[in-house]
Image (tube, grey):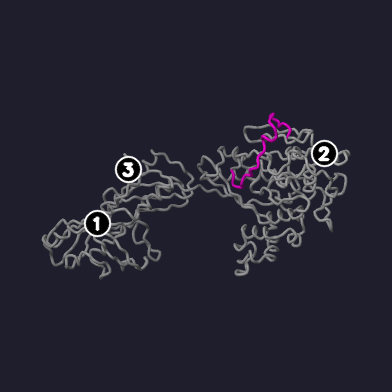
Amino acid sequence: MSLTREKKRELVAYLQSVGCCERCMLRFLKVYLPSSYMNPTLTLEALTKPSGETAEAPEQTAAGGSPALDNVSTNGNGSAAAGVDGSSAADNTASAKPSADDAPCAVPTSLEGSDPSGVGDTEPAAKYRRNVAGDREAACDPVDAPQRSAPATNDGQTECSMEVQEASNGAPAESTHISSASSSICSSCLGVLQDSWLENMVGQVHSQVVKDGYQFSSFTFSVFFPLASLVRERALVAAIADEFKTEDGVPQVKEVLKWVASPQLQKHLGVGFSLNSPFQIVIAVEHPESEQLVSVLADKCPKYFPGLARSRAKTTAAAVNVTSVTKALQAASDEDVKSWYTCPLAQPTAHATLSPVSCQHGSIYIAGRYCKYSRELSQTPWLIDGQRKTETSVQEIICDPLQAEAKATDVKFCSSGREDVDVRMLGKGRPFCVELVDPKRSVISEERVAELQLTINNSSKDVQVRDLQMIDKSGIEHMKEGEADKIKLYRALILVPGGVSCVELGPISDIKELVLNQKTPLRVLHRRTLMDRQRTVHKMSIEPVDDRHFHLFLSTQAGTYIKEFVHGDMGRTTPNLGSLLQASVDIIELDVMGVELDWPPALS
């Protein structure tokens, strides 16, 4: 149910008395228009002016300074009065409430929860009225209500006054001043939504981004708030629940922070905000009250904190998180919260602190094909008990120049299958993709990628790269989707110790779609699951070398163990080449001649 103007004035006066800043006052008035938080003083004046008076609206600015605020006053008969742009208030309101994940720059056209008409219950609630000269009594609980002085509401804001008229008898209006003092700390947001804290945060973010040297064309940011802010807000909601209904909740502090800070960050960083931006700024806020406040909640609601009992951890440990605290607070009734805490909680003595700002850019991806011409080179770094078995690897030869170019913190190498150390990769090469994690340089031109390909190829005679190109993440899925269906071509040099004639070899070329049953080979059993695999040899052909050697050409299903197909692996692969020839055979050399996967696209 929307609050009347009278109730709004009473709520604002009460929130002022318990130490809320102006932006938190707007939150509890359920204002969901992001631009309204740019100049909260004028917004509060517009929302709480007695019916028939008009508050001056801030001017619209192109740089996101103080966006226009629709006039929310009404005319004499209770219908919506014209806004500052000549349109009716009804034209500027809607029922849709934006979610917390909506882009800060996208401004909804509603003041959700506000009552533009000001028509409703006008009976004065005297116990909630405040007078600057009188005592500032917190009337959330008529019994043993704590005494509080009138704190300032919004750090750095210009003082303004709000006229509160007695609607029931036309008595002269009381004057309630919304003052400001930089020394006070908001009892709800812990100072996070106050101007000085926001300015400091924006400055630290800007400094860190400049220091890190990231290249980006847009940004997004995530905010992690102290658990104390959740408890404080719930305690304040419980305190005002009887007089000012808040069933639908209020905008979250981090939501409002994004609305207010986003335009400032855009101005300082020189780029726009985007929810889907790969460049993310992470802001973590802490407060010393968190452990104490949450420990009370954990004692009263142990079922939401099962990790505490098991680990005997403190409330600051991993056993306590935003999810567990939120669930516990949602499950608690207002009466429960009032019995656990003094509602509202006393004004904090310390500001929330900003942890070191961290930045991270989403991964970028570079794909291509590689050929390997050495029989002493592993595909990835080969280490046994911490000792290198090969001097370098295909991965390092390809990835090192790319990582240096992108200034990435890490690199991940992925390929369409892999070959053994002693197996060459020939033909057009094997498709691969390199994920460059958290790159500071995220845009690499086609010309520069071509130069990097040349650099890689000139650095080693054992590895050559082709079709090197930037791709998006979906390209990796395309490569993986073809894993099971792709066909691989091999050439094996076979030894028949007892000799073999062309006549005996002839029938091999006639075999088509030969289905093999392969147990996990003995040579890889230490790192692969023991299981039976069915694989298909699509076709084979023979090319004699001498009376004891011949080349065997195979076209097989991906995942076929070729060495084991040749010698049988002590009967673990059946049928095998030895059983087909009824002779003892062994494999001398193996080359991969092709991986039939049409990816990545060939470059001219």
Q: Which mark is residue 602?
A: 3
Q: Residues within 10 Å of mark 1 (few under 14, many from 20)?
A: some
Q: Amino acid at mark 3?
A: Ala
The quarter holding residue 41 reads top right
For the image, the number of numbered tags is 3
Determine whether the residue tagged by mark 1 lies in a helix, strand or loop.
strand
Q: Amino acid at mark 1?
A: His
Q: Magenta segment, which residues?
A: 80-102
Q: Is residue 298 above or below residue 272?
A: below
Label the magenta part by its dominant secondary structure: loop
Q: Is residue 46 above or below residue 240?
A: above
Q: Position of residue 390 (x, y in %)?
A: 34, 59
List the residue tagged with mark 2.
163
- Tell me the distance, in whole angstroms, between the alpha carbons under discs 3 and 1: 26 Å
Nearer the observer: mark 2 or 1; the answer is 1
Q: Position of residue 509 (x, y in %)?
A: 17, 57
Q: Is residue 57 magenta?
A: no
List the residue tagged with mark 1.
538
